[in-house]
Image: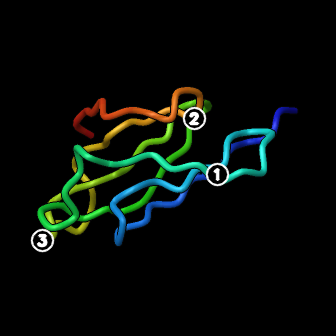
C-alpha cells in the first residue's frame, strides 16, 4: 500500500505545508487564491493526489466551497461548490 501525503494549512503565511507521499521533505504551496481575511478555512481533505481546502464565509457554521491543490504538481487553485 502506498503511503499517503500530509498537508497542513498555515494561516499566518497563507500556504499549505505539504509532505508528498514517500518523502520526508516539507514543501510549500502558496494559497494565492484564498484570502484568510474574507473566508474561513474549515479543514483539509486528501483524496489521492488531490488536497482540498474546505472554505466558507466566517459567519457560516460549515464550508460551502473547496479549493483543490495537487501533491504531484505542488500547485492548484481549482475550486468547486460543495
Q: Give the label, 2 or 3, closer to the camera.
A: 2
Give the mark, 1 or 3, whose residue is nearer the N terminus. 1
Which residue in the protein does label 2 denote? 71
Question: Which of the two labelled residues, at mark 2 and mark 3, occupies the earlier sequence position?
Answer: 3
Foreground: disc 1 or disc 3: 1
From the image, tell me which residue sits under label 1.
6
Identify which residue is drawn at 40% across, 56% down.
15
Residue at label 3?
Answer: 59
The image quadrant of residue 47 is top right
Asked if labels 1 and 2 touch by Cβ distance under 8 angstroms, the answer is no
Q: For numbered disc 2, what is the local secondary structure?
A: loop
Q: Earlier along the polypeptide chain: callout 2 or callout 1?
A: 1
Density class for disc 1 (Cα within 10 Å; few <14, some 14-19, many ≥20) is some
Q: How many marks?
A: 3
The residue located at (49%, 41%) in the rendering is 51
Q: Nearer the viewer, residue 62 or 18?
A: 18
Question: Would you call the spot at circle 3 few (<14 residues within 10 Å), some (14-19), or many (20 or more)?
Answer: few
Where 19 falls versus 80 (above or below)? below
User: Between marks 2 and 3, how big is the CA–CA gap?
Assistant: 30 Å
Nearer to me, 56 or 71: 71
Is residue 10 toward the left or the right of residue 80 in the image? Answer: right
Secondary structure category for the residue under label 1: strand
Q: CA distance from mark 1 to mark 3?
A: 28 Å
Left or right, 53 with respect to 22, comes to left
Amino acid at each position: 500500500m502506498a503511503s499517503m501525503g500530509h498537508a497542513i494549512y498555515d494561516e499566518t503565511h497563507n500556504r499549505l505545508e505539504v509532505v508528498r507521499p514517500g518523502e520526508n521533505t516539507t514543501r510549500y504551496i502558496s494559497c494565492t487564491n484564498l484570502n484568510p481575511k474574507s473566508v474561513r478555512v474549515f479543514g483539509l481533505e486528501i483524496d489521492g493526489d488531490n488536497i482540498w481546502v474546505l472554505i466558507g464565509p466566517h459567519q457560516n457554521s460549515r464550508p460551502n466551497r473547496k479549493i483543490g491543490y495537487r501533491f504531484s504538481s505542488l500547485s492548484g487553485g481549482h475550486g468547486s461548490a460543495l
